[in-house]
Image: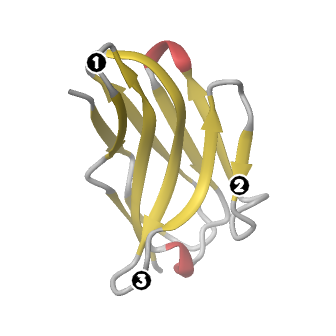
Amino acid sequence: QVQIAESGGGLVQPGASLRLSCAASGSIVAINGMGWYRQTPGNQREFLATVFSNGKINYADSVKGRFTVSRDATKNAVYLQMSSLKSDDTATYYCNAVGATADSAFDVWGQGTRVTVSS
């Protein structure tokens, strides 16, 4: 069984920076990609960024230039460095991992970490 744990959310002022962390654990054989999404009440989950096992990175246009995703393959971890935060960035941020164990493929989500941008 694969589990995802996110951390790093909190309350910050507009213009501030924040770094989210995500680590996958369990009987992981390979991770194809890990990504970040966010969701606000009443809205669909929004894609933010994904980093693939080959190092390729995709960003949503809405965060390109402000958010930076990185990974530590040795820790099955991915990070989201967020800068110049705005009130519109207030949301619950979710991490997703896609890969395989010895028995099956997996596509798992974390429980989410709350980010509030407010003065």
Residue 86 image position (x, y, % from top left): 59, 75
Residue 23 image position (x, y, % from top left): 38, 31
Residue 109 image position (x, y, % from top left): 33, 47
Mark 2–mark 1 distance (CA, rounded to whole Å)? 31 Å
The residue at the point 47 percent across, 80 percent down is 119
Quadrant where the image shows the N terminus: top left
Q: Is residue 114 shown left or right of residue 81?
A: left
Q: Is residue 18 visible?
A: yes
Q: Is residue 34 shown left or right of residue 102?
A: right
Q: Which mark is residue 43?
A: 3
Please report whichever mark, 2 or 1, sits nearer to the chain's N-terminal start.
Answer: 2
Q: Reply above or below: 110 against 11.
A: above
Q: Is residue 116 visible?
A: no
Mark 3–mark 1 distance (CA, rounded to whole Å)? 34 Å
Q: Is residue 73 shown left or right of residue 38?
A: right
Q: Reply above or below: 53 against 117.
A: above
Q: Tell me the residue that label 1 is attached to.
A: 103
Secondary structure found at label 1: loop
Residue extending furthest toward the right: 65
Q: Tell me the residue that label 2 is attached to.
A: 59
Within the image, what quadrant is residue 14 found in? bottom right
